[in-house]
Every structure is written in C-alpha cells, then in structure tokens.
Image: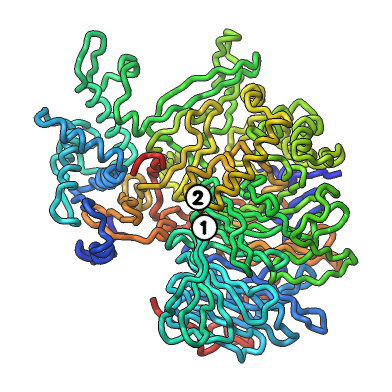
C-alpha cells in the first residue's frame, strides 16, 4: 500500500529549507554530495541569470569495462563532457573527457548519437545561442563540423537539438525564431541563404524544402505557429514515429514525423509551454509551462486529460521516471529519451509499447512523473490511469478533495471515481485501484492537516494547493452545492464525451490559434473541467532555478542555473559504503534561504574542489579554446 | 540616480525609427518620451503605462474632445498631455508634461516637492482622483451630490464611470465561522491588487497566495452575526469580477524594523505575457478572462526613496522601453531582465513593480 512519509515533517517543514534527502512511498532519495558535477575550477558567486539554461545529456557507450556512462552539460560559454560515475563513485572533476569554451556565443543544448557510437567514438551535437550548430566527437576529438556557420539559415538561438531516433545522420534543431530544421550531418549548408519552396502545409504549420539543384542543408524547414514564436522544446515518442513540439504561443503540437501530419494539439491554460516529454509507453504527452502547471495530454484521445498543480513558478522540465512507473505488474522501464540509454541490470522485461491500445482496461497503470521549475523545486507525481480516464467534466477537483478532512479517503474517491469510470465505459474502477490512488491524496492532506493549520504562511512545500486547503477548511460544502448544478450522470457525461471528440476535430481543423475559442474544449479545458493532480512530493532542492531532470536506473539527476549537476540516489541504491550518506549534514546544518552567501553542500572532497591550474589535465581549465574550430561569430 | 540606463542615452529618436523600420512603424502611433522635472520619473513611468493601456487612452481622448472649456483639473491636464502626444506631427520625440506636474503638485501636497515618490501611490491617487472628477462633473440631480474627495456611500450608488469600467474589479471576502460554520460574504471594489511576493515564484503563485485562506484568531477574531460573538474563523479573498485592465502591484517595499525603514525586496517573480486567474470565486462573472501583459512599471535601484522608475509597454506587437525622455525598442526576451534577482547579494535591481494586464476580449 502506498504510504507517503513526508520528509518535511521530520525537519521542521520549513518550505524554504534546502532538502538533501526526502522520502516517498518507495523509500528515501538522497543527494550524493560526491557525485556532484560542475566546472572543474569552482569559483564563488557569479551572476548566472542571463546564462542559457544548464542542460544535461547522457550517453552509455558500449565500453567493455562497463563504465560507459558519459555526461555532457553546458554552463555559460562552456561545455563539459565527463565520465559519469553514478551514485557509487565520486565525480572526478579534474579529468573532463572534453571541455570547450566558446567566444561570443553560448552552447544552449546538446545531444549524443546513440546509434553510431562505439566504445571510443561518439557524435555530440551542440546548438548555440547565436544559431550555429556544431558536431563534435568529445572522445576522439577529430570530428568537428559546423552547420549554419554564417547564420544564413537562422540567426536566432538554437533552443533544442535532437538526433532523429535510429538515424545515423539526421537531426532536428529548433530555434527561437519559431522554425525547426532537419539537417543531414553529411550535407553542406551552402554558401548562400537557402531559398525555400512550400512542401506541405497544415493548420498552424508549414513545411518547406530548399530550392536547389544539389541537395543541401536544411533538408526541411518547419514553421510553427505565428512568425517569431519561439519553439521551446521537442521530443520524439518512444517508438520514434511521433514528434511533440512545444512553443511560446502556448501550443503543444504532435506530428506524425514521417508524414508530417499534425495529429493533435493542446493549449496551455495561459502562457508558453516550456517543456515536453512522452510517457514510456507513448500513451501520454506531458508538458509544463508558464501557467505553473504540468498538463497531461492523451495521445489516444487527443485531449488534455489532467493538470498538475504544485509548482510555485514556471515549470522548466518534465520527465517520466520509467523505473517507478508500472503497468499492472510490468515495469515501464523502456528508455524514455533518445539520450538516456540505460543498461538494465535487473531481469525485468523491457516492455515495448506500440502506439496501440493493446488491452484497453486490463491492468492498472501508474506513471511516475517528475518536474522541476523556476521555483527551485522538484515535484514528483503519481498518475494513475483511473484519473486519466475520467471524461472532461466540471468541478472534478472539488469532489476529489472536498471533505477529505472528515471522510475517509477511499469513500470520497469511490464516490468520485465510480460515475466517471462507468461513463468511459470501463468496468475497471476496482476498489483496490481507487484505494491505491486515494492514499496518495489522503496522505498529503493528512500531513497538511497536522502540520500547519494555523500558519498563515502562504508558502507550502507538500501538496497544499489552494483547493486542498479549502477542502481542509470546509469551504467544500458550499462548492458542492454549486457543483450539483453541473453534476454528471452517466448520460450527460457521455454526451459531453461526444462533444470532446467533435471539439478536438474542430480545433485541429481550424488551427484555432485563438485561445479565447479554445477555452472549454478538450484542447484547453477550463481549470475545473479536468482532474487536478497534486504532487506526491514537492521539495525545494536548490537556490537557483532548476534546468534539467533525468531519471536513471539507480538515481535521478538535476541541474541548476548556477552550473551544478546533482545526483540523487534512489532508495536502496547505496550499497558499498553509501558514499556521501554519512557526510550529509544533519538538519541544523541544512542550508537555509536566509543566508546571504550561496552555500554549496560541502563535497568533503578537497582535492576535487581545488584543482590547480597547472595540473596536467588533458584540457587545462584556463585554455580559452580546446579546439580551433569553434564558432566565433560576434553578434 | 539614473546610472543604469544611461547606456541608452546614445540612442536618439531617429534610432528608434530605424529600429522599428519605416514600413513597420504603426500608423497613427506616437512614441514620445516625457521630460523629467526632477524626480518625476514615478509619474512619467505610470503615465506612459497608462497611455498604452488603450481603453484608458481612448477614454481620456474622448474626454478631451467633449470638454472644450472647463476649469483646469488634473484630468484636463492629463487629457491635454495625451492629446498633445497623440497629435504630434513627428512619430517620435519627447514632450514636457509641465502643466500636468504643476497641477499634480497643487492637488496633492505629498507630491509638491522634488523627492522620489512611490509610483504605485501615484497611480492609486491618479485613478481615484480622475474618477472623483468625473463623478463631480456629472449633471447634478436632486438626490446625488458629489464632491471630489467625498468618498461617501452616495457615489457608490451611482452609475459606474468609465474609470470603473476599465479598472474596477470586485473582490469577495468569504468568512467561515469555525463555531457555527456559517459562511458570510462581503464584496469590495478594487482598482488594483496589491500582492505580497515570495522568492523564486511567479505572479500566478503570488496571486494564489493572495487568495489563500487565513485563520482569524487571537486578537483578530471574527465577529459572527450568527453566534453574536467573536469567534475564530477562516477567511479568504477571491476575485468575483475581473476588471478589463488588471493592475497588479508587487509589494517590493517592506518595512524592516531593524533598519527602521523600508527596504526593497528584489525577489525574482516571473510574470507571463499571458495570464488567467486561478483565484476567482465560484460565482465569478467572467473567470475565464484571458489577459495580455501590456505595460510594466519598473523600479530600478536599491530602495523606495532612491532609484528610478522606467516602464516597458507593448504597442502593435513590439515592446518599447520608456526611460523619461528616452524611448527604445526592446526585444520581448529582454523582459526577463526585469523579473528580479535570485540572490540577495546584489543591492540594486531592475524589477517589475506594477503590471498592467489587459483582457483580450477588449477590442484592440
């Protein structure tokens, strides 16, 4: 049974306190202070506000020794590749695999090619703030190619770069200009600006090809949304067939990549969508954005099925945890991203899910989602399928939380879950599942109940959203009276179900860039028309905004705007002495917000922190360039 | 005092036209800086923001067209100033709001000096004062007598003015007695929302906190009509009617007892270009209203009585920065420079102070 122990309650529950460990139902996650990656020559406080977000890419090389993990991250003008030693061994910052410093431009994003890699070669794409793209081999260091070097293709920042899944030479680069280009790394970019001709057009997007005799880069140009509307991130589905793209215009657009057909859209509640990811089975796309929400979109139903409220600011990264997600008894541990190749040491079968609903209502699926944001918080979410199967209906959120203070959780959710389950036509609303889901909600309410009834403080760290607070305070009865006007019997909900389908079609057909028309449709339900998720945990884990989140088999990795990449060991993954655990500061030593100087959690690894410039490293930290062929355009 | 933005000084007016591009320059639009008469940037920044709140500008110009010869008020001075900007032959330049400032100093003794003033206090005064002038100028009839400054109940019974129609929203405060469980509601009007801020949050979050439930207990108990006694109670304030233009005042000046003065809170608070409200009441009239950010008054510097005010406004799809008499086109991505600071080390900051969001269902 899912039991959540709130880590906050044991150490006073100050939401502004930095966490170095926290508990979930599966156990304790611990920050591994020795597995902290950053630039080797650590310096004091520098203003990093204007820097591009620190992104993290992983690759697992087929290294016979078994130490094939490499990590790449960017910070300011610099780019680092290290051997990633995971939770068991301390990071060695003195010997980066590769280190680059650029003039007049900043690296913004990167991606390893896991198809062409060998034990001692790997292709790494790097995008830059001034629009150029570089292809390097951080191991061999022989390879270096530049794309868009003269900025003839696009002058704006590369916002996301990804190898096409399974391809040895094709990659995608999105720009803040709102354009997305398909490159072949083997082709030249030409000496003149490309002339385009229309290739395909659809609602809210157009695709062009280059009008030239000989094939050149870019192979295709995708223009999404209105002109100049920044593309923030793109993600291929686990099967590689679909491409999800999120933009500053607040749209998620999902394409069938090969046919270039738009298959679905979602609109933010307001503001831009900033990040996107696919569930490991490809059935859901999750996006986060400037509405402080995570939004769950169903690929099969082509509609927004749930929203999650827990962040106190914009959501910068969303990622599924395939190792904690489960489909019935099967773990969903297929690698979720193209660059997060993990070797599976446990014998669980790697289930590959197609874009087909194999058995619609067979097993209870529970997804584990993680998100980090500009609020410096990490949120973990458990999303059960019974919630996602609820049809769009008004006032769901009040029922799911109203009166929880007095009623037992299971009772409440049964009352809520039953009609919705029947309206979908599923017969699976089994009590066991409901109870399972309930515990998550109830426990977070319970901890709130005990803790801070009388605190007038508005900052809370664990699942205390507005609706929840209100339910505790019993405003619920009034709302329920209101709700009755809208209560859905099976009949009315099936009719509303129908309207979803029609509105989906309508919105995709009419481009519907007008959010005023989209509100209340399945593309952008009203706030109380779709289930509201609450985070399992919500922890402040950094001083600066968080910019990366990657789930791995034995840990998860976060990165922060100040250039630090942290490793958090999963419960029970600390065999062999548990490096760093004993060094963890006890509660009084926790870093608190009030301090005026940024305090790093001490690594206890003196030699790592104080590398001397003269150390015989392969790439001396003070070298301005490690290669002579870096993009050096000055804006 | 204007140290930071001196770097814009190199840009002259024709540079702005070049930045925008002759073919891109919106027809019938004028971008005019306002000359500073010694610490009048609090007024300049707010006036620019209001000028680019289109519904407000239109009403002011309408007023100017209707009222040919009346006695000078702050409203006529503002109307003359707006009219003067709107009818300039040149597209860009600067203008001296001399008459307006002189009148302002006569109207309110607090502004009659060369000290730095609080831009929000000025906005608050200006909106209320204009509203009172309009009420006072209404044709008198038997049972309504309005004088400027007489905020009695009579004025609330009268028809709403266009100032109400643009800026006024309704907050409903719901109080639930913990003894008898009865919920009582009370509505109150507002012209802007004054919002407490937290470090590394969004304006969305700050608004949620604005409407979070507080417990009335101890010395602050609630007088329950039902129980006929003081009781502990739970209270929250939510928005019942959303205004056309939502003005959000970020409370960045906090009184610190240990220093015996107000200090500036430079917390990083992000504000999206598009906004909906989460903190609407169940019976809200228009809870789905979608807002666009149209103007931001920015405080630059380290404290309430030192520093500088500038404003950024959106006009015809692009963003402009008004720094007294200087006007520059800026990239929308530069707005993030005004969110605030994540660390408390730096003393000085350029931070969003008053946000103006305009409802999208207003005809542009």
Q: Quadrant of the C terminus of chain B?
A: top left
Q: Quadrant of the N terminus of chain B?
A: bottom left
Relative placement, left or right, of B25 versus B175 is left
Q: Is residue A522 above or below residue A46?
A: above
Which residue does the image show at 25% across and 30% down from the upper left? B130
Residue B122's x, y, as percent?
A: 29, 37
Q: CA distance from mark 2 to mark 1?
A: 8 Å
Which residue does the image show at 30% across and 42% down from the upper left? B54
**What is the chain identity of the residue bearing mark 2?**
A
Identify residue for label 2. Answer: A512
Relative placement, left or right, of B242 versus B236 is left
Residue B76's x, y, as percent?
A: 16, 34
- The answer to which of B310 and A58 lies nearer the viewer is A58
Query: Which of marks 1 and 2 precedes in the sequence?
Result: 1
**What is the chain identity of the residue bearing mark 1?**
A
Which residue does the image show at 79% across and 44% down from the upper left? A4
Which residue does the image show at 39% across and 45% down from the upper left? B353
Q: What secondary structure is found at the residue carrying circle 1?
A: loop
Relative placement, left or right, of B116 versus A197 is left
Residue, far left: B69
Disc number for residue B301:
none
Residue A392's x, y, as percent?
A: 66, 39
Q: Residues within 10 Å of mark 2 (few under 14, many from 20)?
A: some
Answer whether labels 2 and 1 touch (C-beta < 8 Å): yes
Identify residue for label 1. Answer: A203
Q: Is residue B102 visible?
A: yes
């Amino acid at each position: 049974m899912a039991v959540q122990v709130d880590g906050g309650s044991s150490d006073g529950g100050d939401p502004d306190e930095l966490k170095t460990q926290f508990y979930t139902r599966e156990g304790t996650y611990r920050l591994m202070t020795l597995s902290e990656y950053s630039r080797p020559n650590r310096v004091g406080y520098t203003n990093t506000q204007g820097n591009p977000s620190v992104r993290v890419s992983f690759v697992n090389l087929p290294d016979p020794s078994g130490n094939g993990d490499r990590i790449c991250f960017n910070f300011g003008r610099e780019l680092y590749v290290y051997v990633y030693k995971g939770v068991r061994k301390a990071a060695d910052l003195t010997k980066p695999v590769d280190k680059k410093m650029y003039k007049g431009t900043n690296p913004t994003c990167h991606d390893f090619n896991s198809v062409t890699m060998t034990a001692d070669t790997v292709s790494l794409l790097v995008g830059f703030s001034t629009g150029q793209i570089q292809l390097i081999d951080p191991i061999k260091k022989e390879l270096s190619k530049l794309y868009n070097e003269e900025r003839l293709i696009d002058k704006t920042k590369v916002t996301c770069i990804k190898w096409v899944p399974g391809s040895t030479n094709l990659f995608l680069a999105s720009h803040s200009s709102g354009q997305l280009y398909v490159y072949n790394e083997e082709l030249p970019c030409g000496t003149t600006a490309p002339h385009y001709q229309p290739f395909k057009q659809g609602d809210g997007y157009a695709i062009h090809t280059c009008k030239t005799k000989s094939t050149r880069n870019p192979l295709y140009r995708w223009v999404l949304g209105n002109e100049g509307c920044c593309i923030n991130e793109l993600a291929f589905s686990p099967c590689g067939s679909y491409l999800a793209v999120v933009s500053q215009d607040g749209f998620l657009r999902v394409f069938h990549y090969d046919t270039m057909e738009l298959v679905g859209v979602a609109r933010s509640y307001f503001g831009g969508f900033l990040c996107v990811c696919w569930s490991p089975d490809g059935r859901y796309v999750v996006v986060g954005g400037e509405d402080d929400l995570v939004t769950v979109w169903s690929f099969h139903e082509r509609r927004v099925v749930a929203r999650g409220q827990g962040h106190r600011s914009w959501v910068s990264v969303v990622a599924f945890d395939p190792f904690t997600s489960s489909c019935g008894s099967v773990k969903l541990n297929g690698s979720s991203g193209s660059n997060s190749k993990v070797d599976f040491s446990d014998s669980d079968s790697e289930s590959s899910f197609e874009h087909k609903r194999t058995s619609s209502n067979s097993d209870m699926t529970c997804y584990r989602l993680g998100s980090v944001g500009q609020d410096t918080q990490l949120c973990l979410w458990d999303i059960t399928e019974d919630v996602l199967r609820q049809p769009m209906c008004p006032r769901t959120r009040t029922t799911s939380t109203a009166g929880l203070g007095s009623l037992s959780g299971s009772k409440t959710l049964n009352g809520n879950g039953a009609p919705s389950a029947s309206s979908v036509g599923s017969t699976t609303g089994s009590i066991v599942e409901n109870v399972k889901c309930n515990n998550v909600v109830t426990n977070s309410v319970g901890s709130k109940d005990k803790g801070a009834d009388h605190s007038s403080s508005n900052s809370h760290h664990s699942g205390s959203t507005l609706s929840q607070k209100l339910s505790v305070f019993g405003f619920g009865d009034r709302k329920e009276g209101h709700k009755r006007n809208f209560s859905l019997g099976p009949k009315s909900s099936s009719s509303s179900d129908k309207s979803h389908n029609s509105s989906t079609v309508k919105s995709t057909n009419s481009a519907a860039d007008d959010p005023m028309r989209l509100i209340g449709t399945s593309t952008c339900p009203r706030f109380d028309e779709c289930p509201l998720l609450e985070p399992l945990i919500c922890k402040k884990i950094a001083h600066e905004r968080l910019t990366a989140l990657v789930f791995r088999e034995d840990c998860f990795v976060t990165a922060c705007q100040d250039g630090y990449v942290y490793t958090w060991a999963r419960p029970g993954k600390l065999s062999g002495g548990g490096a760093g655990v004993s060094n963890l500061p006890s509660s009084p030593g926790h870093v608190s917000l009030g301090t005026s100087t940024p305090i790093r959690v001490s690594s206890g690894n003196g030699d790592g922190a104080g590398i001397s410039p003269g150390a015989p490293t392969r790439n001396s930290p003070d070298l301005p360039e490690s290669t002579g062929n870096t993009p050096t355009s000055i804006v | 005092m204007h140290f930071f933005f001196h770097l814009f000084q190199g840009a002259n007016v024709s540079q702005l036209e070049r930045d925008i591009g002759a073919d891109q320059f919106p027809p019938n639009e004028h971008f005019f800086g306002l000359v500073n008469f010694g610490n009048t940037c609090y007024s300049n920044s707010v006036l620019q923001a209001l000028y680019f709140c289109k519904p407000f500008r239109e009403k002011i110009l309408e007023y100017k067209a209707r009222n040919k010869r009346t006695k000078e008020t702050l409203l006529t001075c503002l109307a003359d100033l707006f009219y003067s900007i709107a009818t300039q032959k040149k597209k860009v330049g600067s203008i001296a709001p001399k008459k307006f400032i002189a009148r302002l100093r006569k109207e309110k003794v607090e502004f009659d000096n060369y000290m730095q003033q609080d831009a929000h206090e000025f906005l608050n005064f200006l909106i209320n004062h204009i509203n009172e002038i309009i009420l006072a100028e209404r044709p008198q009839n038997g049972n309504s007598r309005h004088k400027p400054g007489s905020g009695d109940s009579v004025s609330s019974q009268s028809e709403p003015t266009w100032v109400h129609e643009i800026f006024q929203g309704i907050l409903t405060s719901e109080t639930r007695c913990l003894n008898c469980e009865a919920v009582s509601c009370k509505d109150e009007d507002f012209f802007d929302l004054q919002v407490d801020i937290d470090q590394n949050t969004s304006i969305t979050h700050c608004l949620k906190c604005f409407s979070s439930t507080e417990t009335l207990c101890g010395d602050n108990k609630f007088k329950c009509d039902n129980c006929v006694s003081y009781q502990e109670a739970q209270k929250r304030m939510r928005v019942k009617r959303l205004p056309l233009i939502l003005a959000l005042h970020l409370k960045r000046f906090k009184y610190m007892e240990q220093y015996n003065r107000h200090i500036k809170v430079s917390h990083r608070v992000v504000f999206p270009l598009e906004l909906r409200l989460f903190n609407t009441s169940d019976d809200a009239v228009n809870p789905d209203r979608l807002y666009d950010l149209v103007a931001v008054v920015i405080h630059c510097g380290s404290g309430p009585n030192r520093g500088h005010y500038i404003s950024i406004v959106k006009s015809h799809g692009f963003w402009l920065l008004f720094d007294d008499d200087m006007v520059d086109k800026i990239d929308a991505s530069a707005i993030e420079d005004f969110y605030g600071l994540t660390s408390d080390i730096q003393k000085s900051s350029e931070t969003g102070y008053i946000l103006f969001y305009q409802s999208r269902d207003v005809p542009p």
